């Protein structure tokens, strides 16, 4: 990976990671407002807004952070399996993204569907209150998890894995090689760019909102 590409991926990873944390914090603030408010219109607006934030900010940013982190691991000497902290960080990011998708379709979308056309008294029913409480707990845990991931990236604890130690020894013995961007990484960049273009086109044309409209 060239220095220019490396700087680009680092910038994209930091921006998407910070954006993911910020969007989750905004989601948490709205969830607390929805749980504590006794104003029916506020409650309705809060959960519809949360559904939009989750669909079009939290989820895309989580995938962006995961993909750019993977690009950095595969395209730089850090590697994906050479350091314990990278393995743990990547594992936590995968878990957080998977849990986020499950949470979106099992809780967030379900709550938004309930409040969109529900009468005022239904907005404060015991069944909906349990969903409201879950929507406070989940982003709170997510923020703690994201802070742990960020801390691992800064402090880089635990050192090399056994695989990393072997690769380091092999690299010291091998003659220096010119820096080239691997073909697989170029293909990955191309596919990632295509996915981003498709995602943007779907939202511009309105197709990305069909699931929410129904």
Image: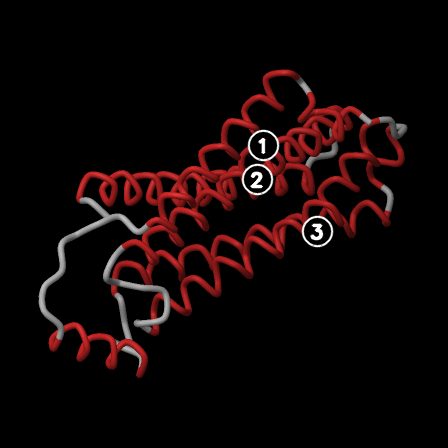
Task: Name the residue at 34% across, 39% down.
Answer: 12
User: Could you tell me which quadrant the C terminus lies in?
Assistant: top right
Task: Name the residue at 75% across, 25% down.
Answer: 210
| Residue wearing tag 1 | 56
Residue 51 position in % (x across, y down) = 67, 35
Rendered image quadrant of residue 154: bottom left
SS state under label 1? helix
- Which residue is more in the foreground, 214 or 146? 214
First of labels 3, 2 by sequence position? 2
First of labels 1, 2 by sequence position? 2
**Figure label count:** 3
Q: Is residue 3 above or below residue 90?
A: above
| Residue wearing tag 3 | 133
First of labels 3, 1 by sequence position? 1
Residue 157 position in % (x across, y down) = 27, 72
* 24 with respect to 44 (left or right): left
Q: Is residue 87 above or below residue 133?
A: below
Q: Residues within 10 Å of mark 2 (few under 14, many from 20)?
A: many
* 144 with respect to 169 (left or right): right
Q: Is residue 107 above or below residue 151?
A: above
**CA–CA distance between discs 3 and 1?**
22 Å
Q: Is residue 16 above or below residue 159?
A: above
Rendered image quadrant of residue 81: bottom left
Residue 102 position in % (x across, y down) = 69, 53
Q: Are marks 3 and 2 in contact (CB under 8 Å)?
A: no
| Residue wearing tag 2 | 27
Q: Residues within 10 Å of mark 3 (few under 14, many from 20)?
A: some
SS state under label 3? helix
Task: Name the residue at 70% across, 51% down.
Answer: 133
* 50 with respect to 88 (left or right): right
């Amino acid at each position: 990976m060239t220095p220019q590409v490396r700087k680009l991926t680092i910038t994209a990873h930091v921006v998407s990671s910070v954006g993911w944390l910020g969007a989750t914090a905004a989601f948490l603030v709205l969830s607390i407002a929805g749980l504590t408010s006794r104003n029916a219109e506020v409650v309705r607006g809060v959960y519809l807004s949360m559904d939009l934030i989750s669909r079009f900010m939290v989820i895309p940013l989580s995938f962006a952070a995961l993909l750019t982190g993977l690009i950095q691991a595969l395209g730089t000497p850090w590697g994906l399996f050479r350091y314990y902290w990278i393995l743990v960080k990547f594992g936590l990011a995968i878990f957080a993204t998977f849990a986020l998708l499950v949470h979106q379709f099992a809780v967030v979308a379900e709550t938004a569907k309930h409040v969109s056309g529900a009468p005022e008294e239904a907005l404060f029913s015991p069944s909906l209150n349990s969903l409201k409480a879950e929507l406070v707990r989940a982003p709170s845990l997510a923020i703690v998890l994201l802070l742990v991931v960020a801390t691992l990236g800064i402090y880089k604890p635990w050192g090399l894995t056994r695989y990393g130690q072997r690769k380091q020894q092999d690299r010291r013995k091998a003659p220096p090689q010119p820096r080239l961007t691997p073909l697989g990484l170029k293909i990955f960049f191309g596919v990632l760019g295509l996915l981003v273009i498709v995602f943007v086109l779907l939202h511009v044309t309105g197709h990305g909102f069909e699931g929410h409209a129904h």
